[in-house]
Image (cartoon, helix red, strand yellow):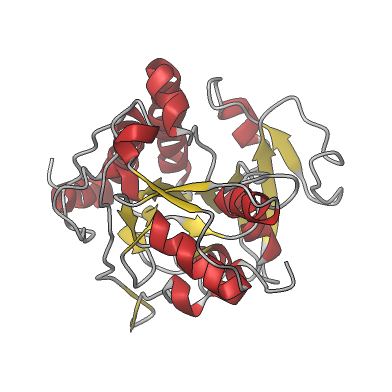
């Protein structure tokens, strides 16, 4: 079903979006608040927000590094969610929780469908019944990589289980909610928080221990800096924007070139960097070029995030 038609049907059924920009203290629930993006959202929490979060059960709030004053609820996306969500009564939900490991999704397609698609659809239905705004974090991996760069209007054509499950989550959200935003996020670069580790932490470990660093020379993306992503998500969540938006940097770059930029920034040579192919390092389909472009505006201005060449010190301060 065309997106414009889905949007019109949602308006007829659920009414027009509410205005959160003028709400005194909206209550925001972040699913997966202990995850990579969730923790950066917590770091850049606007002062006007009442916040709560969900974490996969079981958990010890002090051990996962979340403030004791933060209301946190157990929520496993494989399970029924209504009873947990009904305790919270948020105005806005930012849905960051997902099964995001591409290899794990390929090995467990049913789990990927349950967590990334079916749970998202259930969350969208719950939000629709209560007129709650939903901000769904998706990915550039919904595209095949064969016809880049991709704008918001381009039709997804995923080639792996993770991309397909996230795309189906998009469809579920947009077909049921007129007040929802789907944010496709490119590779978001920064240090992991709260014990979480990612590409940048792995890269620093390798270079500091003088180990060889294999990097894809044939995978192209439009990376972003994660703090900028976190701040922009808050701006969008509290705005009137709806539909699909791309959060991407302004540079198309492969992992090898990214490694070279990081080495230059930190004062290292390139001798540890080993060019490799996606096809030699993975046993599942992985799109080669999912470069995104942003055609949307936010509060009347183009939605632009600086490219990584301009954000290297934010990604890795030189004292690291």
Instruction: Decide: is 311 above or below 181.
Output: below
* Spot occupied by residue 84 in the image (x, y as percentages of width and height): 64, 30
Residue at screen point 61% across, 62% down? 26
Instruction: Give the quarter of the figure containing the N terminus.
Output: top left
Report the number of numbered marks: 0
**Viewer-side residue, 3 vs 165:** 165
Residue at screen point 66% across, 64% down? 49
Instruction: Decide: is 165 above or below 308.
Output: above
Instruction: Decide: is 273 above or below 282.
Output: below
> In the picture, residue 230 is in which quadrant?
bottom right
The outermost residue toward the bottom is 301
Residue at screen point 28% across, 43% down? 142
* Spot occupied by residue 193 in the image (x, y as percentages of width and height): 71, 53
Instruction: Give the quarter of the figure containing the C terminus.
Output: bottom right
**Viewer-side residue, 177 vs 263:** 263
Left or right: 255 with respect to 226? Answer: left
Whether residue 145 is visible to the viewer of this picture, yes or no, is: yes
* Spot occupied by residue 134 in the image (x, y as percentages of width and height): 45, 49
**Viewer-side residue, 151 vs 263:** 263
């Amino acid at each position: 079903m065309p997106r414009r038609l889905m949007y019109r049907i949602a308006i007829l059924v659920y009414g027009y979006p509410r205005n959160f920009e003028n709400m005194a203290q909206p209550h925001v629930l972040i699913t997966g608040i202990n995850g990579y993006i969730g923790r950066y959202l917590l770091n850049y929490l606007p002062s006007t927000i009442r916040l709560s979060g969900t974490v996969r059960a079981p958990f010890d709030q002090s051990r996962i590094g979340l403030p004791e004053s933060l209301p946190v609820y157990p929520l496993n996306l494989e399970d029924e969610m209504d009873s947990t969500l009904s305790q919270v009564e948020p105005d806005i939900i930012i849905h960051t929780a997902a099964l995001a490991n591409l290899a794990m999704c390929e090995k467990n397609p049913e789990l990927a469908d349950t967590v990334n698609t079916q749970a998202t659809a259930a969350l969208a239905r719950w939000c629709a019944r209560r007129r709650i705004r939903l901000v769904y974090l998706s990915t550039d991996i919904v595209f095949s990589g064969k016809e880049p760069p991709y704008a918001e209007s381009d039709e997804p054509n995923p080639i792996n289980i993770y991309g397909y499950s996230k795309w189906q989550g998009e469809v579920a959200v947009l077909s049921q909610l007129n007040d929802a935003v789907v944010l496709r996020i490119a590779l978001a670069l920064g240090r992991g928080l709260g014990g979480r580790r990612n590409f940048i932490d792995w890269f620093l470990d390798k270079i500091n221990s003088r180990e060889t660093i294999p990097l894809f020379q044939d995978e192209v993306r439009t990376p972003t800096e994660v703090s900028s992503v976190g701040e922009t998500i808050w701006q969008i969540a509290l705005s009137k924007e709806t539909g699909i938006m791309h959060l991407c940097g302004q540079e198309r770059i492969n992992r090898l070139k990214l490694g070279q930029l990081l080495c230059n920034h930190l004062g290292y040579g390139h001798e540890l960097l080993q060019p490799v192919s996606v096809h030699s390092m993975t046993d599942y389909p992985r799109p080669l070029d999912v470069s995104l472009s942003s055609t949307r505006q936010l509060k009347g201005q183009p939605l632009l995030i600086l490219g990584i060449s301009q954000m290297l010190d934010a990604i890795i301060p030189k004292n690291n």
